[in-house]
Amino acid sequence: MRPEWTDPTGLTGYYDVLSNRYMVPTFLEAVLLATAHRRSPVFVVLDEMNLARVEYYFSDVLSAIETEEALQLHAHGVPLEGSNGTTVPAALPLPPNLYIAGTINIDETTNPVSDKVLDRAVVIDMSAVDLPGFLAGLEAREPALKDARAACENHLVAVQGIMIAHGLGIGYRVAEEAVRYHAFSAAHLAAGAAGVTDDLMVQKVLVKLRGGERQRPLLTGLSKVLDGLPRSQDFIAKLTADLDEFGSFQASR
C-alpha cells in the first residue's frame, strides 16, 4: 500500500482517456485471474494496509464483499481493453476463490483501522516472537552463523523477556541483523563479541525506547540483563536520569 492513496484506483484501476484503455493494477489483475480460473484459489496479500486510511481506498471492495454485489469499475456500456491485454467489464463480482489478506503495523507512522474494517475482517495477532526458534532455524539454514548466534543469543533472549512484558520486543529482522553483524565483525573487524553486542544493543534496541513512570521497571530490568555492557549501561542510565528529571524518557530526544 502507499500512504497517498485516498481512493480505490490503486486497487481497482481507472479508465485512461489518453490511451482509451482501462488501467489494470495488480489487485484487479488478481480478481480477473480468479474470475477466469474459478477452480484455482487466488491469494492477494496487501502489505502495510494502514499506511493510508483503509476506509478511503478499500471501501468499494469492502462493500462488494459484504453485499455480494459486483464491484463497479467503469460506466461504459461495453467492456474495455485493459492495460494488461485483458478485457475489463463495467462491473465485476468478486469470485469465491479469491482470498484477501492484509498486514497492518501499529506505530506512529500508520493510521488507526476503524471498526467498519475490523468488523469485516478476521484479525490475527502476530506480535508473538520466538527468538530461540528463529535463531535455531537461521543456523540450520546457514551453519556458518553458529558462532555469531552463540555470541549474542543469550542477550537477545534476555532483553526480549524483559521488553515483552511492556508490549515491546525484538523482532526477527533485528535478531537476524545482530547475528549477521557478529559474523561480519568476527571476519573483518576483529572486535570482541561483548563489545559488538554492546554496540548492537544501543544502536538497534535501546535507541527505540520511550515511556514514562510505568516503564521504570523496563529500564531497571534491562540494566540487570545487560550488566557488563558499559555502553548499554550508560545509555540506560541517561534514560533513567531523564525519567527522574522530566517524568518521561525518549532515546531519540
Image (spheres, rainbow, N blue to C red):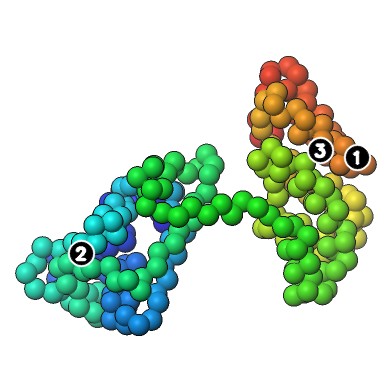
Residue at horizontal 53 percent and vertical 44 percent from the top: 106
Is 90 located above or below residue 110 in the figure?
below
**Count of picture labels:** 3
Q: Position of residue 134 (x, y in %)?
A: 73, 63
Give the quadrant of the N terminus.
bottom left
Q: Secondary structure at mark 2?
A: loop
Whether residue 77 sits left or right of residue 124 in the image: it is left
- The three-letter amino acid code for the residue at tag 1 is Asp
Q: Mark 3 to mark 2: distance in Å?
A: 55 Å
Q: Secondary structure at mark 1?
A: loop
Count neighbours of disc 1 (C-alpha within 10 A) and say few if under 14, some if 14 to 19, many if 20 or more. Answer: few
Quadrant housing residue 232? top right
Q: Position of residue 207 (x, y in %)?
A: 70, 40
Residue at numbered disc 1: 227
Q: Which mark is residue 250?
A: none
Which is more foreground, mark 3 or mark 2? 2
- The three-letter amino acid code for the residue at tag 2 is Ala
Residue at numbered disc 3: 222
- Relative to the observer, which residue lies in front, 14 or 252? 14
Q: Position of residue 204 (x, y in %)?
A: 72, 47
Q: Are marks 3 and 1 in contact (CB under 8 Å)?
A: no
Quadrant housing residue 77? bottom left
Count neighbours of disc 3 (C-alpha within 10 A) and say few if under 14, some if 14 to 19, many if 20 or more. Answer: many
Give the quadrant of the C terminus.
top right
Whether residue 12 sits left or right of residue 103 in the image: it is left
Residue at horizontal 45 percent and vertical 58 percent from the top: 102
Q: Residue furthest top?
A: 245
Whether residue 124 sits left or right of residue 53 in the image: it is right
Q: Secondary structure at mark 3?
A: helix
Residue at numbered disc 2: 70
Q: Are marks 3 and 2 in contact (CB under 8 Å)?
A: no
